[in-house]
Image (cartoon, rainbow, N blue to C red):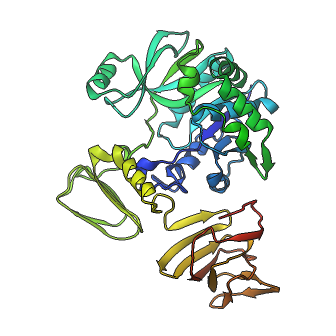
Amino acid sequence: MAIIPVILSGGSGTRLWPLSREAYPKQFLQLFDHHSLFQSTLLRLKGMEGVGAPLIICNDQHRFVVAEQAQGVGVALSGIILEPVGRNTAPAVAAACAFAMETHPDAVLLILPADHLILDLVAFQQAIGQGLGYAQSGHVVTFGIVPKTPETGFGYIHRGAGNDGAGFAIQRFVEKPDVVTAQSYLDSGAYYWNSGMFMFAAQVMMAELNTHAPEVAYSAQEGLAQAIKDFDFIRLDLASFSTSPKISIDYAVMEKTNLGVVLPLDAGWSDVGSWAALWGVGEKDTADNVIIGDALLHNVDHCYIRSESRLVAGVGLSNHVVIETADAVLVAAKDSVQDVGSIVKQLQQLGRREHQNRQRVFRPWGSYKCLNIEDRFQVKRIRVNPGATLSLQMHHHRAEHWIVVRGTAQVIRGDESFLLTEDQSTYIPLGVRHRLANPGKIPLDIIEIQSGSYLGEDDILRFEDDYGRSSD
């Protein structure tokens, strides 16, 4: 019986703004080392006996980031399922079950969020081994994190009687408690943090979904039956999938099933759900500060300071978070960082863009970084990966000047086709079809100067595209 890991990668990570953005959320960030949280999730499964190629579930906007980051750590994927709309975890799990059963009817699925930190890989892998036995015998397993503190930001699982082995029956799920209640849970030893990690046979979970949440099961199965497949992507049908209610797998199944088992997990786990959580797991100096990047501090203690692009100086701070990026700075009391999402909501309401993208925006062909934007002009640095090609396109409202600063550019401009090398440039008039490619073996870097009445990314009319896109 094969184990198919299912990585849920649809989160937006708003509480880690301004580092985490809608187009590039926390699971894709390198918060601890040179691997992103998503890559670390893939790597902790690598080499585990009986574990097959992971299946990823994400939204359309992140599809190329997922593919590129998996390739970057040498992990082959069994597929990338694209949700046309977010419907919480139950529909995602249902789609994964339906997909797995097409080729592996007896598969056991291991459901993992893409954005968790787990420090003790041995303990994690041992728990997966224990969970497999329960899943093979028809149980629906969830992994409960052994609590260390009276955490009020997590839901809890109240364990019941012990089963044969390490697992316990599930007595109930409880919502996020107040601090007094959380302390009582910690003192009792009978409660675990709800990790959002599960393990079960695909057939068993689908049967439970059909029993307890038939609308979810039906919409996911129909969404997959009508899916469009291109490259490694499986695009769930919008009309079918969007009929599913928005509901978590906890509410849809786990709180209703008689098959539930909770396995305690003590593996240095963190959901990396806030800046305070990052401070908690970070390497601290003698004043209990976590410092990342260029920072000078005086009389500062118990703080998380992160600089992305310039010097950050702090004086007389205690229990604060300071996050600097090229276009936004967050300063917050550490005990208030759970409210950072309210700033993101304000940005959305005001029609601003700082919640969407950082200065560097990733595309399937590479990335671009906005260096300056003013009325009627914008300057970008564009990087095209070796062998990659942008779409054949034109713009109604802007012209572009390209200057090559590294590498070789293959340019199509109207009926012309020519090469540009370092320090050479060209001009793309408004309304002219054009295309940029990197035929070389090193990254191509160009400076692009846009000028015109409108400079938005939606001013692109595509004629051909290697990546199936209709807009950037």
The answer to whether residue 20 is above or below residue 234 is below
Locate residue 145, reporting x and y percent: 44, 28
279 up-or-down from 202: above or below: below
Name the image quarter holding residue 468: bottom right
Q: Does residue 22 appear anywhere in the picture?
A: yes
Q: Is residue 99 above or below residue 346?
A: above
Which quadrant: the N terminus? Answer: top right
Which quadrant does the C terminus fall into? bottom right
Q: Position of residue 320 (x, y in %)?
A: 26, 52
Q: What x and y, as percent, mark residue 303?
A: 27, 52
> Residue at 67% across / 84% down in the picture?
430
Residue depicted at 61% across the width and 26% down the height:
199
| Residue 406 location, quadrant | bottom right
Q: Residue at x 33, y 16 (%)?
A: 188
Residue 296 quadrant: bottom left
* Residue situated in front as seen by the camera: 17 or 112: 17
Q: Is residue 20 left or right of residue 221?
A: left
147, 176: nearer the viewer: 176
- Number of labelled discs? 0
Residue at image point 69% right, 37% down: 241
On the picture, is 248 further left or further right than 81?
Answer: left
Determine whether, in the image, residue 282 is placed left or right of residue 407. Answer: left
Return the residue nearer the eye: 432 or 268.
Answer: 432
Q: Say whether residue 130 is visible.
A: no
Residue 8 is situated, as x and y percent measured from the top left of the image, at 60, 40
Q: Is residue 82 left or right of residue 19?
A: right
